[in-house]
Image (spheres, coloured by chain):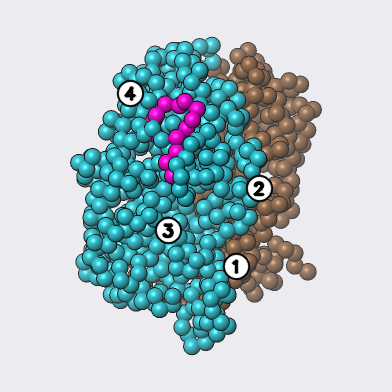
Amino acid sequence: MMLLLLACTETVDTGETPPVAHLEDPLLVRRMSLDLRGTWPTREELSLEPEQAREAFLEDPRFEERLVVLFGERWHTLVDEFNGDWYDFGLERQQEYAFQRAIGEEPLRLAAHLGATDQPWSRLTTADHTMANPLLAELFPLQREEGEGWTVARYTDGRPSAGVLATNGLWWRYTTSLFNNNRSRVAAVSRVLLCQDYLERPVSFEGVELLDEGGTDRAIQEEPACVSCHSSIEPAAAVLFGFYTVDEYSPLEATYYHPEREALGEELLGVEMAWFGHPVEGLEGLGQAVAQDSRLYSCAAETLTEGLVRQSGLDSEPHRQAFVDSGGLVKALVRSITDSDAYRSAEARLLPLDAYASAVEELTGFRWEQDGFDMVRNDEVGVRVLGGAVDGRELLTPLRTPSLTWTEVTRAIAAQAAAQTAESDLDALSWRVLGTAAPDGLPGLEALLRDPEAVTY
Amino acid sequence: MLNRRQLLFGSAAGAAGMLMPRGLGAADGRRFLFVFANGGWDPTVVFAPLFDNAQVDMPEASVEATVGGLRFVDSANRPSVRSFFEAHGSRTAVVNGIEVRSVSHERCRRLALTGRAEGDADDWPSILAGHGSGELLLPHLVASGPSYTSAFSSQVVRIGNGSQLPDLLQSPTDSSTEAWLLERARTREGELAQAYERVLSDARQVAELGLPFRDDEAWLDRVDGLLDALEGGASRCGLIRHDGLWEQTFDSHAANFMQSEHFELLFSDLSGLVDAIEGRGLELTLVVFSEMGRHPQLNGQQGKHHWTATSAMLWGDGVAGDRVVGGFDDQVEGGFTAADLGATLLAMGDVDPGAWTDGEVIEELLG
């Protein structure tokens, strides 16, 4: 193991900064391995042509896991708290994290599955199924296909086919209230799937008599400043009333789809169902309309460009074009992004926490868990935010440069991985060598896992 | 004998020389402590005596009262409010009528702290921390609550919802490993390597100092840890969330009478906080705020929905106290924006507001 690490380190440690702006091939392979599989490459893989290595990485089962993380950075469904909790379902306390994670991952798993299995992106909002692991199938009315981990599953409560728009996971994260009438859910869909954030638009209340009874409703329909947003929000919100709950804190209500409430939307909001001016019929119609919205594809391109290049505000248009040209295949999108100058830039980047943790686990077998919690993937007891990842509620942009808490998190991971490796596999002498630093000055495993070369890519 | 604070941050003059953290005594700008009342408080319960406005449902068993230059809403149910103003009013300013122009928690939190709706803005404490001495170990220390950063991400140090950071710092790494890592970082080029070298060094210092935060502590004990960092010169800004009674938050869509309970606890805690600050002889600016206000009228569940105009309260260093600034018009709308308050805080911190916000400094607040 140590030889492998040193080999990687030696290969990576090229001394002078290359005169060219692009990474050298082995370093590019290393970057792609971390981005697409969440692990450092083997020595053999380092000698492959980057494009050859990339194709192998795209077929690796771990690619699907990485897509969950990458889309999660925008979708913000991987939160620590929902209105329902583990005890509502008779689970053990040790299952708290698994419960939270299963619900938050559901929509992301569908996106990742479509991407990893070469299905068109249009299925994101039209698929007749979701994804479920055994726990999720236990919680929700789901019929799950046989297999380990996350498999295709279908709801049995009569909900329409609308891909992620028909998942409990999305609507458990983005709730509504009796007064909000699904408006916030439309805003969430717009931000998550279209990269259009209503909340970033300028708001003017000039001329709006907010205190008058009915003044707000009139303004939504008549005031130009209000109409510009609400003319598209209300008609889409009207479609989502199958997920409307009388008691937003009732897990039972939020578990099941309510077809009998579908008609409430048009009545309560006083509009007809539509998606940005195009009339739709029910949730299935909404899913189809979203699937035909060009912004669904530009947003996926923007999300993965930002996630893979680790930079905001980049031009993702060429990648969107490649994505669309391929018929909406995520792998084509990833190829386009990883071919770009921005991706191949020699400038070092900070390794995202999730990729760092999975790479260490792959190398050493160490996974940091406590009382059933994955410590790098939650904030209730874990260190996700301290390590620079988003929490989906208060911290929404991943860390790009090292911070004090980030270095403490990587230290904790590396030290524990080194200790576990030494204790489980090696004798006392090796512990000295691998655990910390050896008497002759050789770096130990902890040091190697925290080497500037190991934590950047 | 040195107390915990002195041991941790070396604030005792004699001890400081032995273990002087980087930045100790070098917090050359005004220090700030932000208390975020989570959920959207109802200004009419304390800050806005709008008894003359028939469109406003005022809290029960409440009257308009005055302590010095502070007009407020008094009630026997909220004795801590009156006692706070009586004890600390001379250094307290209330700002009424701050418009966030939204009723979404997410957007209002961002607006309250950055003055902008866009996602690429830094919040006031991060900007202030980023304009500190440049030598602070924990420039903006977040015990809990929202934080928005763009240019100043590296200035923010989070304790963690469960005080995870102190736990992380408890198991020091072999010094030879740290030395090897520092050496490796120094041989690398680029900003990332330099940043890594800096945080390695900072982390070692913080680990040696320890951080006095425990997640099982009461709110006042947790905020005491922030005071340690501010007093010791490790931080310029701190942020902590206050969730009201039973951590229900101030988001009272139903049963708005709970606002009274939340404010009573908040002001009781603020009294303890100010006592602690004064007991240390510490000079700082306390900023107490909430992301939005509440609708003037009760709804069918005797609650109040969200409202675009809110209030804030400042106390301490640099604050022109004993006054209420601004107000609410007959439509219960305000004349200030969140950016105005932000600009004022930046000005108090000797940061050019114009470089960060289009808000206008509220001159009446500057002491």
Vertical side of B328 occupied by B5: above or below: below
Stretch of the chain drawn in magenta = A151-163
**Rendered location of residue B125, percent (x, y):** 52, 48
Residue assigned mark 4: A276
Q: Do the residues bearing badges 1 and 4 touch, measured as CB atoms within 8 Å?
A: no
Disc 2 sits on a residue from what chain? A
Q: Do the residues bearing badges 3 and 4 touch, measured as CB atoms within 8 Å?
A: no
Quadrant location of residue A59? bottom left
Residue assigned mark 2: A93
Q: Earlier in the sequence, mark 3 or mark 4?
A: 4
Single out the mark in the foreground, 3 or 4.
Answer: 3
Quadrant location of residue A368? bottom right
Residue assigned mark 3: A355
Q: Secondary structure at mark 2?
A: helix
Cα separation, mark 1 vs mark 4, equals: 54 Å
Q: Colour of chain B?
A: brown
Say which quadrant the C terminus of chain B sits in: top right
**Rendered location of residue B317, percent (x, y):** 62, 47
Disc 3 sits on a residue from what chain? A
